[in-house]
Image: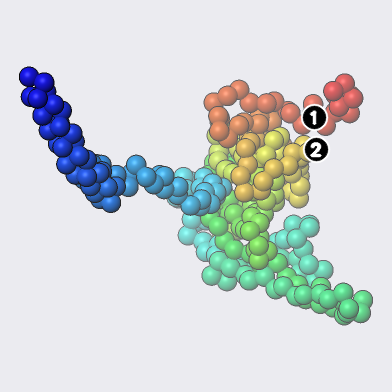
Amino acid sequence: MRDIASNLVLLSLIVIIFLSPACRSSVEAEKQNPNVSEQPVTLAETQPAAIPSPSPNFPNLQAEITDERFKTTNSDLGKFDFRNFTYPLPRGWQHPVDKQITLENGKVRPIAVDVDEDMSNEEKAERKAARRIGMSYVTSRFFDVTGDGADEAIVILKVETEGSAIPQLVYIYQWKDGKPELVWNFRTGDRADGGLKDLRFENNLFTVELYGQDRFLLGETETGKITGDEEQLCCPTYFTRTAYKWNGRSFLMQGKRLSFEIANPSKPPLENYGDIVNNPKFVKKK
């Protein structure tokens, strides 16, 4: 029995010695060829999700004034060619020589002249005098804004400055003696800085919406403004709605100036906000 046990132990040692190289070879083979023991790894597991490159997404601030509302009329104004017409320029946009501008095919190109600091004062003045603003036709709307029973034409022009600014001029014409006659005109600001959002006739009043907080028509050449109301011109966050009534000579504001959040227009508006913000007593209390 002792001899048998010794033989079994010896046989076991021989088997272990014989199998050890095979085990090592198998492990090394797995290291050299990972596909043997590992599942393939997909790209989704090893690569991060693709991040889209940023692209500008500026709002179209002209969408409302260029839509299809108020495009038709029975008035002869609807047949008139406002793309080829002469318009008076308001103060601030007038040239010492030219106080009006004539569109041809809806456009007048600006004349830009550079001025160098090395030039003499006379040469600087001469070159500046050669500058001219440009103008382009935007659209016309037709509704009875004066309450006389006949539609007027509300013509919107854009001042061309060779930049991204969008200051605009608005002209209101009635049809008289076989031609358009100017009733009233005004200018607006640039995009978030009092730029034109919409014009319409609503509740028997001429309704004007301008971008910005408490922005409204202040005569024919200016818009009211809150001190410190400054933001990116491209992307206004507020607009102001005001309403006007024709008294035979000009448009007088009716009711309150309402400032709405663009992102939440159903939220109750700020009323006459500039009266509070621009009030020195209020500023001191703050």
Q: Position of residue 230 (x, y in %)?
A: 73, 42
- Please identify the residue farthest to the top as the structure is shown: 1
- Please identify the residue farthest to the right as the structure is shown: 121
Task: Tell me if 212 is positioned left or right of 98 in this view.
Answer: left
Judging by the rendered image, the residue that carries numbered circle 1 is 277
Residue at (37% x, 45% y) in the render? 46
- Tell me the amino acid under the disc marked 2: Thr
The correct choice, above or below, for 29 with respect to 2 in the image is below
Judging by the rendered image, the residue that carries numbered circle 2 is 227
Residue at (58% x, 24% y) in the render? 267
Q: Which callout, 1 or 2, points at the residue further toward the start of the chain?
A: 2
Q: Position of residue 186 (x, y in %)?
A: 70, 50
Tag 1–tag 2 contact (CB < 8 Å) = yes
- Tell me the amino acid under the disc marked 1: Val
Q: Position of residue 106 (x, y in %)?
A: 55, 66
Task: Describe the element under mark 1 as helix, strand or loop.
Answer: helix
Residue at (57% x, 43% y) in the render? 198
Q: Report if residue 57 is visible in the image.
A: yes
Residue at (18% x, 34% y) in the render? 13
